[in-house]
Image: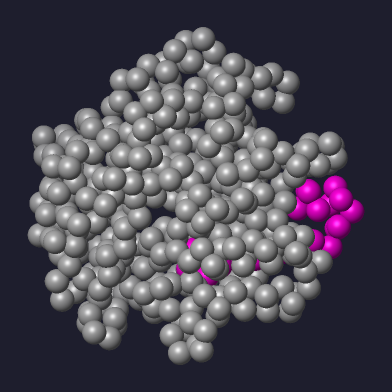
Amino acid sequence: MARPFPTAVAEPAKITRADGVYLWDEAGRRYMDASGGAIAISLGHNDPEIRQALVDQQRAVAYANRTVFTSQSLEDYAAELGPILPMEDPYVFTVSGGSEGVETAFKMARAYHVARGEDSRHKILARGGEYHGATRGGLDATDRPAYDRIYRPWLGQTVKLPRYFEYRCQAPNHPDGCDDFHIAALEEAIAREGANTIAAFVFEPVTGATTGVTHATERYWRAAQEICRRHGILMIADEVMCGHGRTGRWFASDHWGLRPDLLVAGKAASSAYWPLGFTAVSGPVGQVIADSGIFVHGFTYSQNAVGAAVGLAVLRKMKRLDLVTASAVKGKFFADQLQAAMGDHPNVGDIRVKGLFGGVELVADRDTKAPFARSERTVERVQARALAHGLYSYTSVGLADGDNGDLLLLGPAYVSTEEELSQMAALLALAI
Ligand code: PMP
């Protein structure tokens, strides 16, 4: 008998209906969706406007191969993205999700250097404590010891930097603090590897799936940008989770005036109505790649008309309702609610919120920040309790110490009401 591959949960509820911030299973049980699936749903479930855009494009044309055709929705989508992307005259390459977007960015970075005769530049620099996808390139740039154990023979080409993690700064005793330690680490890695071997530096401006809503300071980002420019290293902002309004700005890079050469988005870009991601590349860099004629790349569903139509409808709705401001304003309210509901719980070590992006780190001991052992499966147990109370929350192992750690990742839809946000915080506190 053929079956769907098992989920992490032994007996998953079968979801049959969804609307706004709610999901219902076949038994009629209701769940609040505090995490928008995997931090993907920006507009809530069952939005009639987005559904209509999808159906309209399907009716007109579902697919025409991008290698020889274009579509109005793709042209309009790129034009609509232009003004909000933190780069000059960008080119947009749409794909089917974040991992494909990251691979596209890595390949573009490599092609750019080869096109300029710098064939020696092939390495990717990646910060620790980050997630960059499930495909082999993204996996190699990801920091998760549990993956290493299985896939190590395939990995090891990415140059890894230390984890930037304010709550667990790896340099608390460094004379210049966390920032300088990490700026120095970047310089040291480049000097050690040789700048002329490095193609790109990939980073999540606000981390997601591994360390949960941590970010460096403006001083770090300005220094990192200056270092990369000086050494001819391209900057790739992986904003698959933190981008597209999630942190209260269009892109998390905007918080620190970052101007990456490449930017990858996904998740909120389509609010999960279609498997969509995109890689944006600045005009000057993209032009070199396009003119070279050596960049042969694409997936069957790259640049497809339906994905672009959905992305366009999401983007237009977000602009019309000013949902980026809503994310910032509601995020402050959400942070206060979380703090009030669980801030003094002995096992809540840290609550980190930026816009409508939240991370709650669970610890065995608040004073020492000691994590629970992974074998206790604390975050999974909290998730199960939350489901029993009618709340769905995304989880992560958190990487507090080796493989140990427990992190709840929250990402309510930007259209959530204050009442819904405070109920999410209350239900989560109950589960904890
Ligand atoms: N990069 C980041 C920062 C992500 O959070 C994710 C997904 N969690 C990815 C890449 C990969 O995206 P996808 O799962 O859509 O392939």
Residue located at (65% from left, 70% from top): 159
Task: Give the residues drawn in magenta, as a range.
Answer: 110-130
Is residue 3 at all visible to an observer of this figure?
no
190 is higher (above) or lower (below) than 390: below
Residue located at (51% from left, 56% from top): 256
Say left or right for 59 vs 424.
right
Is residue 349 at all visible to an observer of this figure?
yes
226 is higher (above) or lower (below) than 325: below
Quadrant position of the N terminus in the picture: top left
- Residue 15 at x, y percent in the picture: 23, 37
Among all residues in the image, which is located at the extreme right? Answer: 117
Choose top left, top right, bottom left or bottom right for residue 293.
top right
258 is higher (above) or lower (below) than 47: below
Quadrant position of the C terminus in the picture: bottom left
How many labels, in total? 0
- Residue 121 at x, y percent in the picture: 79, 61
Residue located at (19% from left, 46% from top): 421
- Residue 341 at x, y percent in the picture: 13, 60
256 is higher (above) or lower (below) than 26: below
- 346 part of magenta stretch: no
- Residue 10 at x, y percent in the picture: 24, 54
